[in-house]
Amino acid sequence: MLNNLKLVLSQNRKILSIFFVVVFLPSIFLAFFGMRALRNEKFKIQQQTLEEHKGYVSSVQKDIQDFVETQSTDLMGLANSEIFSDAGYSEIRESIVGVQQRDSFFGEVVIWNKKGELWLPVYQVFPLTSKTILEPDEWKTIQPNLNEAERAEFQQKDFSNAISQYRQVLSRSNNDKVRAWILSRIARCEVKQAGNKQALVVYRSLIDSFPDLLTESGRSLEFVSRLEMLNILYTSDNFEALFKESLETYVRLEKKVWSLDISQVKLYADTLKEMINNVVAKELEDVYPEGFLAAVIDFQNKVEKKLHIGRLAEFAVQDVLPYGEDILDRIQGANFPILKNVLMFEGEEVFLISVPLNGPNQGFRMDFLGTIFGANDLTINADTLLSENTPSGISVLMRSNQTGRIVFGEEDAESKKPIFTDLFLDNFPPWRVELYKNEAMGSGFVLYENIFFWMILTLLVILLFGSSLIIRLLAQEMNLLQLKSEFIASVSHEFKTPLTSMGAILEHLQDGKIKNPDKIREYYRILRHDSDRLKRLVLNVLDFTKIEEGKRKYRPISIDIGRLVRQEVESFEKEHKLSGFNVKLQMENNSFPVYADEEALNQAFHNILDNAAKFSQREKKIEVFVERKGEMVEITVVDKGIGIPENEQKKIFEKFYRGKKASSISPTGTGLGLTLVKHIMAAHEGEVVVSSRPGEGSRVSLIFPIREGGE
Ligand code: ADP
């Protein structure tokens, strides 16, 4: 086997080298470069995708940083404006509210000093200094008259006297503050003497005339008056008016019209709430104005929001204070640094951007100006986050660096790793943007859309195809080699048997010892039979060689097939007389004239008859039929021999092929018989047809046209 392989390989060295050089090497070479190109392509696409992701993340960052930048610039603009050097609180407040109205995202503005005392547009939290509640000069000059009236009010409890004394002082003064304070005292006395109606009138005039003034103790005159009015309405069961007035008070409390500190707003809001709750408890539903309770809740929420901002501002300021003083000491009029702080307040991330303010304002030192905004404001302002700009197949998440809390986006249930992460410049906001790959998204690289993939695939197919061809060729060659060596062995055997027998007989005859004429005749018959056998064998081999070389010539003549078959059957019977073969010949007609090569037909018929005899073991019965079928003649040999397995029925016509069982029961044979028969039939435009069942026997027919007279 191994030797055969070596032999086949060396015999086919040329074709193998051609295959190796022309197909194998170039395929491997190209496939190698194709793979490299494929890898490069993949890498390139991955790089492109990464660039796209980076671009997206930096545009998200830019949106957010731009927003922070705008806040800072607006804040600087405010800080540098004139109002902080010479304007009053209300002007400053209006200016800030103006900025907030222009930019609805501009945060809550807060101003504070080094001590942490703070002021927002929505509150006035600065402690009132002596200057804010400064008594007018006139207040001192009227002190004796006031003392007189106070005596009547507090000691004598003569309220109408007190009122008339207050009114006298009032009529002499033109100063607003003095008039407002005295009117408050008059209203107080009216309440004390149960002159509710008059008291209401006075409070109303105070509210209308002096909304911006403070009381003697520094509280909002308007608001104190309003609360007093509400109290009067409540105690006098004037609920209808009470509802109307309380809504109005809410409106004023919620608007940024007063500079109240948080504790005042809270106190007033609580008082209002309690009063309304008390009235509601009385279940006087029919007197509520339409939508009253809903409006109350709405206002309460707004006020609560305002309180929240106040608390937040206080908290934020405390956070920045430790740095503040240090910064003020350092800058000494130099350029403003911008401070950026992040705080966690009531579970929320809050940002404070602030700048130091220079110079006193009307006697107050206002050291810092800041703006407060939430994480939500930042993400809302990042258009790229909310738009469809997100690269396909990607989801974006914003996470706080400090707490890991998710600021934007939703975390996937399976905690995947981000494919790209980036921080903000200067770590502000202290977040990181994380990009995640969605389920559906691939690497962006589609293998079968790539030309190199198809190139490699084609090369592989070529290589496989070529290799399989080569392997088939080698296998065939090896098979042929095997068959040839078997052929040589069996041909040698075929030659040896008759030659040995002929040699022995000739020896006997030569010695002249055999005298019996019958015996001599028998010897001659055997000699004849053996020489016929040898002749046929040689003929088969020679014919085969000629066929292989394409040199086999056929010479058709008019012959009688009936005669040919009969003679062959007779000589077969003679030959096999001793073996006990029973041959039955059936012919429709005695004569079958055909136009054919006699020798070739004789050879073909002999071969199939010889096979029938060779492969019959127990039942030695052979039938021969010669029939005319239309324009064809059919010579059929039927035996009851070993039969031919289904899988061998095609192969038996191949050169040198011998059936498995056949070779075991008849070791002699060349495997050329049927190859020749097939060729002879083909040359006569006919065919050889085999039908067989293993173990039951075979039926082999030669079918070819009659062609009488060679037409
Ligand atoms: P050979 O007879 O020398 O083996 P052939 O070419 O005549 O070669 O036949 C090829 C094979 O076909 C045989 O080896 C045998 O297996 C099968 N064969 C042919 N004729 C018959 C038959 N009548 N019965 C069984 N097997 C047959």
Image (cartoon, rainbow, N blue to C red):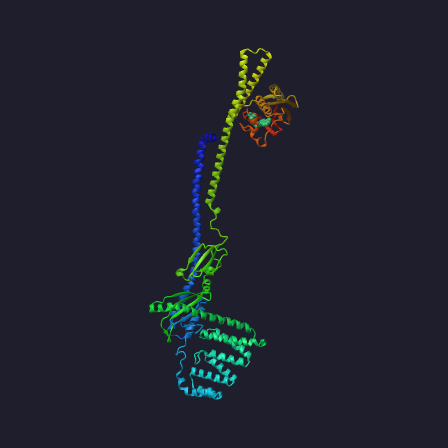
Number of numbered discs overlaid on the protein picture: 0
Residue 667 on image: x %, y %: 55, 25
Q: Quadrant of residue 103?
A: bottom left
Q: Is residue 273 visible?
A: yes
Name of the residue lying farthest toward the right: 588
Residue 597 lies in what quarter of the image? top right
546 above or below 171?
above
Q: Quadrant of ligand 1?
A: top right
Residue 497 placement (x, y as % from top left): 54, 20
User: In this image, 34 relative to 616: left or right?
Assistant: left
Asked if one can make out residue 683 in the rendered structure from this viewpoint, the answer is no
Q: Looking at the picture, tell me which residue is in the foreground, 62 or 398.
A: 398
Q: Quadrant of the C terminus?
A: top right
Where is 77 relative to 176, above or below? Answer: above
Q: Position of residue 506 (x, y in %)?
A: 54, 14
Between 204 and 593, the one nearer to me in the picture: 204
- Residue 633 in the image, given as x and y percentages of width and height: 62, 25
Q: Write down the quadrant of residue 524 in the picture.
A: top right
